[in-house]
Amino acid sequence: MSACSCISIDIGDEADFHTSSVQKSRAVRVCEECCGAINPGDEYERVFYVWDGMKETYRTCKTCLEIRNTFMCSWHYSMVWEDLQEAFVYQDGIPWSDIGSLSKEARDIMCDWIETEIWGDDGGEE
């Protein structure tokens, strides 16, 4: 795992049990972060945990995982983009220099997200 920029979100209590692994998908799955498809053969992170007796499984696509690992030290599963937006608006923003360390695919997604979600530019004419 790479060093993150340490955007930290208060996530409350720790899980009772937690396991995480990177796997190759054998079926079409959905990324819990971007709601995009994880196709057969794609690598993704699978996280299983037990929290107050409730069992949960989360799947994160390779691109969202890269963005999360670059910018976040703590996060809510299925809410990384909301956590990033909160950091952007209410904390000191995100470290711009770290965007350059992302893969082209992750950088493009991050820049599109900043333009549409943060700056409100949907690409339309004024």
Image: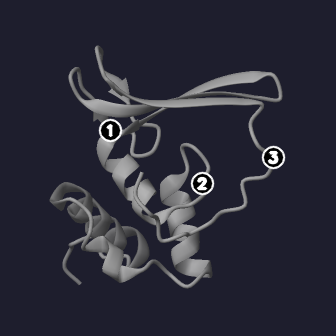
- Residue tagged 3: 13
The quadrant of the rendering that contains the C terminus is: bottom left
Point out residue 114 in the picture as x, y percentages from the top left corner.
35, 72
Q: Residue sitting at 40 percent across and 62 percent down?
A: 70
- Residue tagged 1: 36
Q: Which mark is residue 46?
A: none
Point out residue 71 in the picture as x, y percentages from the top left corner.
45, 65
Point out residue 68 in the picture as x, y percentages from the top left corner.
44, 55
Viewed as shown, does residue 85 lie left or right of 17? Answer: left
Judging depth in this view, the residue of 51 and 31 nearest the camera is: 51
- Residue tagged 2: 75
Q: Earlier in the sequence, mark 1 or mark 3?
A: 3
Mark 1 closeness class: few <14, some 14–19, many ≥20 residues within 10 Å: few
* Identity, as a three-letter code, of the amino acid under mark 2: Trp
Mark 2 closeness class: few <14, some 14–19, many ≥20 residues within 10 Å: some
Residue 81 position (above or below residue 96): above
Q: Residue sitting at 44 percent across and 63 percent down?
A: 3
